[in-house]
Amino acid sequence: MDVRKAAGVLETGSPSPAQLAEINKLTKSPLTADEVYIFAVRLCDDQPDRDLEKFSATALEQLAPMFVGKTGIADHAWQTDRQLGRIFAAEVVRDEDAVWLKAWVYMLRCDKTADLIREIEGGIKKEVSVGCAMARTTCSVCGADYGVCEHRKGVTYDGKLCVAVLEEPTDAYEFSFVAVPAQRAAGVVKAASDAQSAEVLRDAAFGRAYRERLQKDVVRLGLVLDTGLSETLLRAMVRSLDAPQMEAVRSALAEKAAQLFPPATQLPRDTDETDATDSAFLI
Ligand SMILES: [Zn+2]
């Protein structure tokens, strides 16, 4: 039914049913879409970083499944209360500029995570660093094990910059939000940069429009029913409700209105955008 669906995707970053199914493979008891916030991160790529190292594309492919189930923390500290999110899906993305590892992270929506979610949404927390164990590094110029040949990182040989190529991952560790990541491009993936997130954004826009409609309906009903509550108070009350609560209030008030004002009385149509209650939602 539309109503529950709209409530489930009200906030940017709610999981799709398929994503929720992946998340619930990792949880002890099943979570609902409402309880979960998700975001995508760019963990690492095949571009030289500030240490003049890069991951090979093969290594990224091998790392992807290793990261699933790994935790994310706010800084490199291992106290349990700093473990804020968990990777539930990871895939290698190949675009024009780079091959990179994209991970989807879920967090529980709770008091502990509220600030971080706000910071992610606001673009304040956007960089991550990633931990993993690599068995081998090779020379990007000749392919030998790094350190065995004569090539050195940062030196250009016949127009080719030597970097150490990270190969053969043996383990993936946590990822962490940091001020300055070692991998230049690592960070929270811009929400609008891929189709999956665009879908989330569309759903969120739909959710916002739906929520505004609900708010208007409840304020109108409160006024129509002559509850004695001022428009200002009604607006304030409505703003504090989530969508399911607003639906409950709307349906209770609508039922009351139907009893008091039998069929002939219709609520003001929503197309009447100039009525007084609209001013509530111009903030
Ligand atoms: Zn070499």
Image (cartoon, rainbow, N blue to C red):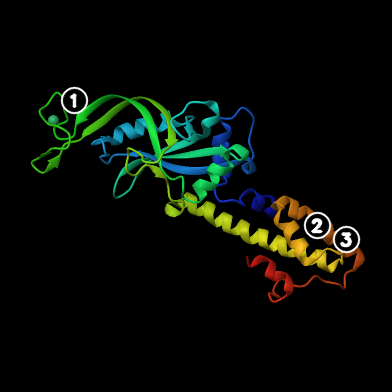
Instruction: Report the front residue among 49 and 78.
Output: 78
Residue 141 is left or right of residue 15, and the answer is: left
Q: Secondary structure at mark 3?
A: helix
Tell me the distance, in whole angstroms, between the alpha carbons under discs 1 and 2: 70 Å
Q: Earlier in the sequence, mark 1 or mark 2?
A: 1
Q: Which of the 4 image quadrants contains residue 36?
A: top right
| Disc 3 residue crowd, few under 14, some 14–19, many 20+, Cα 10 Å | few
Q: Residue at x 80, y 65 (%)?
A: 230
Residue 110 picture location, percent across and down: 62, 39
Residue 107 picture location, percent across and down: 55, 38
Residue located beneath label 1 in the image: 145
Q: The residue under label 3 is which amino acid type? A: Lys
Instruction: Report the front residue among 71 and 138.
Output: 71
Q: Residue at x 48, y 49 (%)?
A: 196
Residue 15 is left or right of residue 229, and the answer is: left
Residue 100 is left or right of residue 195, and the answer is: left
Is residue 18 visible in the rendered image? The answer is no
Tell me the distance, in whole angstroms, between the alpha carbons under discs 3 and 2: 9 Å
Q: Quadrant of the C terminus?
A: bottom right
Residue located beneath label 3 in the image: 256
Residue 14 picture location, percent across and down: 57, 46
Is residue 123 visible in the rendered image? The answer is yes
Q: The residue under label 2 is which amino acid type? A: Ser
Residue 96 picture location, percent across and down: 29, 50
Q: The residue under label 1 is which amino acid type? A: Asp
Tell me the distance, in whole angstroms, between the alpha carbons under discs 3 and 1: 78 Å
Residue located beneath label 2 in the image: 251
Q: Earlier in the sequence, mark 3 or mark 1?
A: 1
Instruction: Report the front residue among 2 and 216.
Output: 216
Q: Earlier in the sequence, mark 3 or mark 2?
A: 2
Residue 92 is left or right of residue 19, and the answer is: left
